Image: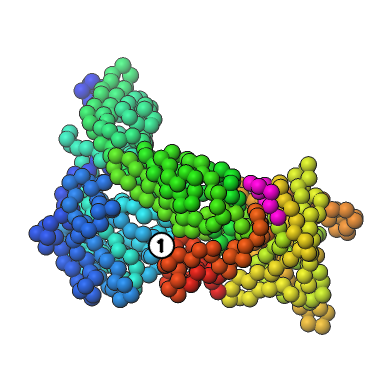
């Protein structure tokens, strides 16, 4: 009987080797820096005045922040209301093994619903075309809300060995200008001179290619996180610009082998994306981004990405009017509605965020607990057969409360607007009562500060628009701490003849578990058979985070007729032309139901 022969392995069989998933050799590139090179691309215009072309006119958005040698970019200018269907196509490219196509795009996502591009690849031999990306769908799927150079990359494994063409097709009516640059097709490179080029904050996947079946691994990453690893193929993040080396040592028993790639990882800094953080101390509002009193310091926050190292704030009407602090403190001493801006810079460049008429100081304003953009999420929160949250229900929930933070100065509330998501009632004379209450020592709704009611028949709602139902107090209530708005008295009856039932509900924003919640509910105590015991208890809604569309009118000083939803205290010139703008002062051509806009100096909610 033959036995198994022992495996004899020489030390030479153990050899350390590795590659990174972003180590590529470029074999086709187009930097769009000369008309001569761009001549190999084909432009198919439908609007000869607004089609693809090279430009160096966008100095503020220069691709030199990514590639210092860049002179121009491929551009498409919006046609100011004209129809566009503009295609630009690359020359033929023979795809190698392990290839990826990459490019950078600068665009403003606000206007993609009007015009955007698709990026496609066509197999020259068969004529079959595949869309690799629809820009509009991508931005909506990922919730993209930045305006900066963004890198796109797509693997080309299915086209290996084939000849292809790439194309950008920009289609729509009145979108915004866009730039394309840094187009290249590249293949994975494991030769000794290969480099990995990334931006700060990107992650690289290292791939072990060692020979001889190593048993252990020791990676050393200069400048990376983690700095060392014992995994066979680790992932490493580089947060700081620089050029870094990578070392791998593999072992098998007493044998070892090392491989070093000097200067293998090249990390570049990208210019920041400026983003203003409004004061957390201020009230949120449907009509301004932040509402604060006069004479009280508030802190603005830098929420910029991309590691800015310098900041330049401008606060019109504020003290100070400018600041170079990252998170400055500002006082507004005069009542008004003000704009502000932030320039965030680093060695790679500068970006600006601007908010027009975003902060109101003093006066009166509607406040609520919805974040900017959440008004689009307002809905009726149905509890199935058991009725609604914040409305008619058969669960023994008799009242709902919305909690508000402490005002920055003593204030008053004279009325509350409530947006309902349904108003069907068979009990029209039922009193829906709204009260303003203090916060007790246990954190629950306590003493009534003011109260009023409206009949169920007077609740306002239509399918076309969000319309407020106003609850007006006979005497304004003073608030100097946290407070609740409590709504109760929702009927839950059935008409025996028609079988119709009460169906009242306050519009709500429903969030994911663990996210912001501002509501409480008053629940009846019941016996084992579900019969009420005559007592009730308040519970904070932590299981299903919700905020109700409840808007008390907070006044920090003597009310002014120019405050509130009807008019701006000062109408900016660009709002007097009858056109429609959002609250950031950007002109819009399509309205979203429930969102707030400005026309001819007046604010309104879109139907």
Task: Kindly identify the residue that appears in the image at 30 percent across and 68 percent down.
Answer: 78
Task: Kindly identify the residue that appears in the image at 18 percent across and 68 percent down.
Answer: 43
Instruction: Answer left or right for 526 relative to 402.
Output: right
Residue 232: give x, y in percent of width and height: 35, 32
Residue 44: give x, y in percent of width and height: 19, 71
Instruction: Answer left or right for 269 relative to 39.
Output: right
Residue found at the very far bottom of the displayed protein: 497
> Which residues are drawn in magenta?
404-412
Residue 126: give x, y in percent of width and height: 20, 67
Residue found at the very far top of the displayed protein: 254
Does residue 564 show up?
Answer: no
Residue 181: give x, y in percent of width and height: 23, 54
Residue found at the very far left of the displayed protein: 36
Q: Is residue 287 above or below residue 235?
A: below
Task: Kindly identify the residue that appears in the image at 52 percent across and 57 percent down.
Answer: 337
Image quarter hosting the N terminus = top left
Snapshot quadrant of residue 379: bottom right
- The crowd level at tag 1 (other Cα within 10 Å; few <14, some 14-19, many 20+) is some
Instruction: Answer left or right for 406 relative to 117.
Output: right
Task: Specify how the rendered protein is coloured.
Answer: rainbow
Does residue 35 show up?
Answer: yes
Residues 201 and 3: in front is 201
Snapshot quadrant of residue 546: bottom right
Residues 159 and 182: in front is 182
- Whether the magenta-drawn stretch holds residue 239 is answered as no
What residue is shown with label 1?
110
């Amino acid at each position: 009987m033959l036995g198994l022969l022992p495996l004899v392995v020489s030390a030479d069989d153990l050899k350390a080797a590795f590659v990174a998933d972003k180590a590529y050799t470029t074999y086709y590139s187009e930097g769009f820096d000369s008309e001569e090179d761009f001549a190999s691309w084909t432009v198919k215009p439908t609007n000869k005045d607004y089609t693809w072309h090279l430009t160096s006119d966008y100095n503020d958005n220069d691709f030199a922040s990514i590639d210092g040698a860049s002179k121009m970019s491929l551009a498409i200018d919006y046609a100011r209301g004209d129809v566009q269907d503009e295609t630009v196509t690359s020359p033929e490219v023979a795809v190698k093994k392990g290839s990826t196509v990459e490019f950078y795009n600068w665009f403003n996502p606000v206007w993609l619903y009007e015009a955007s591009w698709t990026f496609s690849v066509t197999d020259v031999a068969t004529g079959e075309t595949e869309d690799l990306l629809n820009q509009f769908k991508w931005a909506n799927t990922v919730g993209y809300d930045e305006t900066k150079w963004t890198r796109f990359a797509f693997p080309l494994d299915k086209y290996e060995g084939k000849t292809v063409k790439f194309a950008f097709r920009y289609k729509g009516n009145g979108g915004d200008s866009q730039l394309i640059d840094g187009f290249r097709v590249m293949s994975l490179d494991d030769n000794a001179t290969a480099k990995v080029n990334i931006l700060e904050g990107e992650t690289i996947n290292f791939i072990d290619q060692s020979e001889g079946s190593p048993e252990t691994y020791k990676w050393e990453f200069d400048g990376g996180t983690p700095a060392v690893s014992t995994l066979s193929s680790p992932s490493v993040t580089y947060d700081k610009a620089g050029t870094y080396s990578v070392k791998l040592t593999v072992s098998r028993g007493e044998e070892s082998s090392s491989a070093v790639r000097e200067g293998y990882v090249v990390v570049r800094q990208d210019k920041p994306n400026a983003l203003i953080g409004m004061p957390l101390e201020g009230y949120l509002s449907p009509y301004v981004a932040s509402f604060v009193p006069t004479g009280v310091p508030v802190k603005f926050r830098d929420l910029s990405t991309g590691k800015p190292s310098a900041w330049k704030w401008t606060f019109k009407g504020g003290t100070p009017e400018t600041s170079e602090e990252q998170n400055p403190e500002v006082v507004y001493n005069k009542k008004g509605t003000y704009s502000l801006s932030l320039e965030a810079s680093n060695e790679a460049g500068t970006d600006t965020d601007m908010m027009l008429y975003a902060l109101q100081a003093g006066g009166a304003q509607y406040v609520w607990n919805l974040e900017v953009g959440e008004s689009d999420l307002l809905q009726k929160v149905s509890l199935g057969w058991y009725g609604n949250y914040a409305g008619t229900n058969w669960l023994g929930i008799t009242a709902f409360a919305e909690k508000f933070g402490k005002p920055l100065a003593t204030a008053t509330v004279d009325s509350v607007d409530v947006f309902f998501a349904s108003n069907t009632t068979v009990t029209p004379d039922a009193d829906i009562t709204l009260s303003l209450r203090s916060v007790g020592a246990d954190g629950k709704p306590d003493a009534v500060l003011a109260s009023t009611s409206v009949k169920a028949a007077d609740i306002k709602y239509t399918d076309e628009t969000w319309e407020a139902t106003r609850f007006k107090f006979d005497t304004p209530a003073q608030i100097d701490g946290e407070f609740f708005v409590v709504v109760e008295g929702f009927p839950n009856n059935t008409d025996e003849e028609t079988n119709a039932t009460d169906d009242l509900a306050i519009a709500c924003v429903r969030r994911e578990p663990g996210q912001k919640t501002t509501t409480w509910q008053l629940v009846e105590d019941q016996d084992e058979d579900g019969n009420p015991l005559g007592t009730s208890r308040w519970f904070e809604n932590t299981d299903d985070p919700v905020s109700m569309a409840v808007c008390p009118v907070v006044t920090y000083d003597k009310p002014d007729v120019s405050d509130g939803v009807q008019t701006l205290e000062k109408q900016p010139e660009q709002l007097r032309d009858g056109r429609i703008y959002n609250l950031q002062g950007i002109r819009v051509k399509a309205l979203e139901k429930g969102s707030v806009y400005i026309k001819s100096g007046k604010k309104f909610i879109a139907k």
